[in-house]
Amino acid sequence: MEFYLSLLTLFGFRILLGLSAYVVILTGQISLAQAGFYALGAYTAGAASSMWGWPIFPAILLGGLVGGLFGLLVGFPALRVRGLFLVIATLAFTEIVRMVFLNLKYTIRVGDRTIGPAAAEGFRGITYYFQNGWSSLQIVAFTWFFVLVVLLAFWLMDRSRAGAVLRAVGEDELAASSVGINLTAAKVAAMTAGGFVAGLAGALYAHYATYVSQEDFGVLLATFAIAYALIGGTGSVLGPIAGVLFFSLLIDGLRFLGDWRNLLFGVLIVAMMNLRPHGIIDVGLVRRVASLLRPGGRKAYAGD
Amino acid sequence: MTDLVLDVVQQLLNGFLFGSSYALIGIGFTMIFGVMDKLNLAFAVTGLAGAYTGLLVFHLTGGPFVVVFLTAVVSAGLIGLVMELACFRWMPRDYPLASLMATMGMLFFIDEVFSHVTHGRPMAFPAPMGQVVMDVGPWLLRGDFGFMFLVSLAVMGALWALVYKTRLGLATRAVSQQPVAAQLCGIRLRRVNAAVFVITGMIGGVAGALIGSAVGNLSPLLSLPLTVKGLVTAVLGGLGSIPGAIVAGLLLGIVEYEALFFFGIGYRDMVTYLLLFAFLVFRPGGLFGQSRH
């Protein structure tokens, strides 16, 4: 049971991370900065709860806000660069954040323990859950509270004007700007929202892991963030969930293969992209399902 | 001359020479982007995979360096072709993200093959120059760095001849300027793309073998840093520009070695990334780029 609970908690972080990449991808941009936001959220929230004695809820929110603030800051200069240049610029951001934490030393004494980011040794002692005697079930519920709130918010956004604006920018910038959409606002908003969600994910992760280190927040994590969204598909908010399930089932389901598992992993990504280049849940699938669900929809679809 | 000046010039020399390998990897990224408008994240590992194949031949036959080197180049060319087939040929042309993700999968896959076969341990790579060091005035010139530079120069010369003196080169340039117009002129897009992947793969193989012999070993730990440095080089030079990649590679080598000397290993990469970030913000087209993206 404990095993499944912690797996469910891990799914929560991954889904949040995937969603943070998803909202940026909607505007047609690829950002590798999500790992940087995640790291900032983890360190800030960890410091807030374990060093400054904040209660847990504001501490997690602070992690999200710091992620969002940096999303805003990265979003603006990133507007000057587009497409693949943005991939590289955001990669640089993630690596710079990682190196700042590799060199940051800021510790305090609490009782007989030293707590805080200790440069290369990482940040130990983010033990709020443990000190307050939280059970695994409580941790799962707390994590999934945030996951569900973000999912709901994105679901509503997708059905509103804001979602249409983001998708319009992603489909065709020229067409979007010629119908009066403010490209700058749309892209910076997406980046800020993505930063906030990634910051939340990092903050929750730090409290679950109790120890974080800059090594965990590298290019690989950033890659996984966009992989969840791209493999899962960007047709609906369920896409990143499908992506997380795909990867998690591969990682844990292929364990019987031993060492060969990791080899198959890369091959399956390549195969998957050849079979469904727009991801598992792409726009076409969403339309088909939607028309099937509408009353008399099957006929309408057949008549298309 | 003060010691400081001596040291700075020494690092300048080392960085300049070692930067030639970054230039080769940058050329690969930039050429593929030029013809396909898509990024091949698995390019640096293609070169490394070639170098590993060369190493395999070395362990099987104990052959001379030339054989190892040629094996690396040829096999990297073939692996380049596999990349084209697996990650580009059947992908939707107007959706670059699918190829991006597929090449990422390839990066994971090849990296895992290295780890699997070598059990994650670094493997010694033969060095043609041994530990030769030459004196140039008050400075030292490492033989393997000099060798790297000369070979890279030769590869760049050959590439220049290929791109500007052959029909294939003409076709390549046409495709990178206007794919549709090139196709209308009777250029077979797929054949040109495949050729570019084989050629860049071979260049990657040269870079992989040179880095292997200069560093002294190959390890899976090289995959990600080389990928990142290749990307940085391609972007600094202006994506799609071969001369840009060469200048940017040499510049990156110099910046890295000077940063290593002044700030130490912990801050070396940070200086590189700050330079990159500044470039992207203030000169987004890169050194030689036209701002078409």
Image (cartoon, coloured by chain):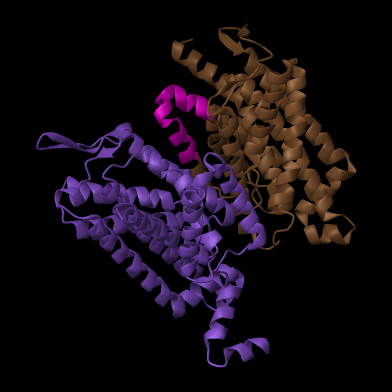
| Location of residue A238 with respect to A98 vertically, above or below | below
Chain B palette colour: brown
Measured as percent of width and height from the top left, residue B54 is found at 71, 25
The answer to whether residue A139 is left or right of residue B90 is left
Query: At x 63% / y 58%, what residue is drawn?
Result: A273
Asked whether residue A72 appears in the rendered view, the answer is no
Whether residue B222 can be seen here: yes
Residue at horizontal 81 percent and vertical 53 percent from the top: B190
Q: Work out which quarter of the rendered image holds the C terminus of chain A and state it.
A: bottom right
Magenta-drawn stretch, dominant element (helix, strand or loop): helix
Asked if A213 appears above or below B179 in the picture, the reply is: above
Q: How many marks?
A: 0
- Residue B115: say if magenta: no
Foreground pick, B20 / B129: B129
x 58%, y 63%: residue: A279
Left or right relative to B59: residue B6: left
Q: Colour of chain A?
A: purple
x, y (%) of residue A117? 26, 38
Classify B276 as above or below B72: below
In the rendered image, the residue lying farthest to the left is A111
Report if residue B256 lies within the magenta region: yes
In-front residue for pair B289/B212: B212
